[in-house]
Amino acid sequence: MRLILIGSFSLAVAAPAIAAQSQTPPGILRGVVFDSLITGRPLDGAEVWIESTNRMARSDAAGNFVLGAVPPGRYRLTFYHPMLDSAGVFVPPVMVDVASDSSTNVKLATPSPEQAHRLLCRRDPLRQTGSIVGMIRNAASGKPIAAATVTVHWTTYDVSEGWVRGAPRSVQAKSDSSGHVLLCGLPTDVALVVRGRSNAGAAGMVMVDLAGRPFARADLQLAAQSDTGTIEGVVRTRIGSLVPGATVAALGTDATARTDEFGRFNLEGVMAGSGILEAHAMGYMPGHTMTSVRPGSVQQVEIVIGDSVAVLAPVSVEGKYEPYLARVGYVQRKLTALGHFLDTTDIRRSGASRFEEVFRMVPGVKLRPNGSGFLIELQRGEGQIWNPTLGNYCPPLYFIDGVGFRLPPTQTPSVPIVPAEILAIEVYSNVFSAPPQYQRRDGACGVILVWTKRGVPKTGASQ
């Protein structure tokens, strides 16, 4: 994979530098180098070169550089910085004209994050997405690792009326011969976990937060599990207070430790390479930091956790108690709705040991034997293919404590509830007789509402 980025500078075909006459006074070339790609600040330590010569100047902490005694003429000016190489980005030369006995000012900059994302991820069909360019190295030797598998993980949540689904997402790519890897189509509003693994089994991971930016860089060092090191450090709050008794863990491993009375900890036998440390303490928000451990070495770190949680004075609230089943509408629907209702007395009287067996006492419900269990059937679903092995079985739509639940399409689908957990059940033979908030298109074969003891607020009664 070639990562070639054309910057914002126009590139023209340049002739060799025009040699100046010895009697012509030279000029001075001044400028500033700005990092538009990663930091958004002046770029320190950039090497600025006049091509086809040995003239070079290095930018200072403010990004400034000076090339003195430059003969008048037209030159091609370029710059290099290790950050550009590790990001897989190339900046083309810029044409400058140096006049005799005068100072010429020039501004050099890396491409912007928008340019980097647009030009590196040309096939990305989505908008408002981000990209990461990673550099994969061996934790012991520092050499680039080719053909390493790099995966970015995150979780998305789909929220709709009565439903919340979490779905793991990932994007995967392999590093090229120079150790670079490009990952496109990434969200910019969540923290991303970047994991790498080489063909030899060396592994490592880092956390990257694009924070709304379209581009970021990740340096990932991989090491075999046999290569270990030690991590020593302290846990502090944001205001600098030491935190005793905090638990520190290296994510993805079994390595854990507790801080002493001075907030210090020691983790031995931690797998070398890039890793993530997490610290937890009672009354504080957790904190994270990234580490890079070399085999056989000791890495010093500091983990900053969130401020302590303020404990408010007790507040007394008086209110009228409303039973759980009345609160969810069961009591009112039992008086008015067109359904069949079971309470704890009915369920206990059924003597059922499995959820499906409770419905033996419900008129109109059929229990179809299915291996070692039963299938609940309220209506026949002629021609519907839900599970080819179950014929034309059409399952009812379930809601457990108000949250939709669909049976898994397995050989022996079942609702994961035992009769002893159930407070009440509502059975509606068709979707039109069900309460409006529980009517769904996939409820054509009936709707069953299950209210469990798990859904009862801890401060309320069960009946």
Image (cartoon, grey):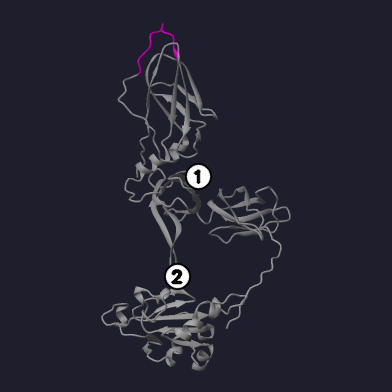
Quadrant of the drawing holding the N terminus = top left
The answer to whether any part of residue 81 appears in the image is: yes
Instruction: Tell me, for residue 162, which label it has, or none.
Output: 2
Q: Residue furthest right?
A: 261
Label 2 residue SS = loop
| Span highlighted in magenta in the image | 17-27
Spot occupied by residue 289 in the image (x, y as percentages of width and height):
57, 51
Q: In the depicted view, which residue is nearer to us: 328 or 414?
A: 328
Residue at 40% from the left image edge and 87% from the top image edge? 374
Residue at 59% from the left image edge and 50% from the top image edge? 296
Quarter holding residue 392: bottom left
Residue type at mark 2: give it: Gly
Spot occupied by residue 271 in the image (x, y as percentages of width and height):
55, 55
Let me know if residue 14 is in the magenta part: no
Q: In the depicted view, which residue is nearer to us: 54 or 333?
A: 333
Q: Is residue 261 above or below residue 96?
A: below
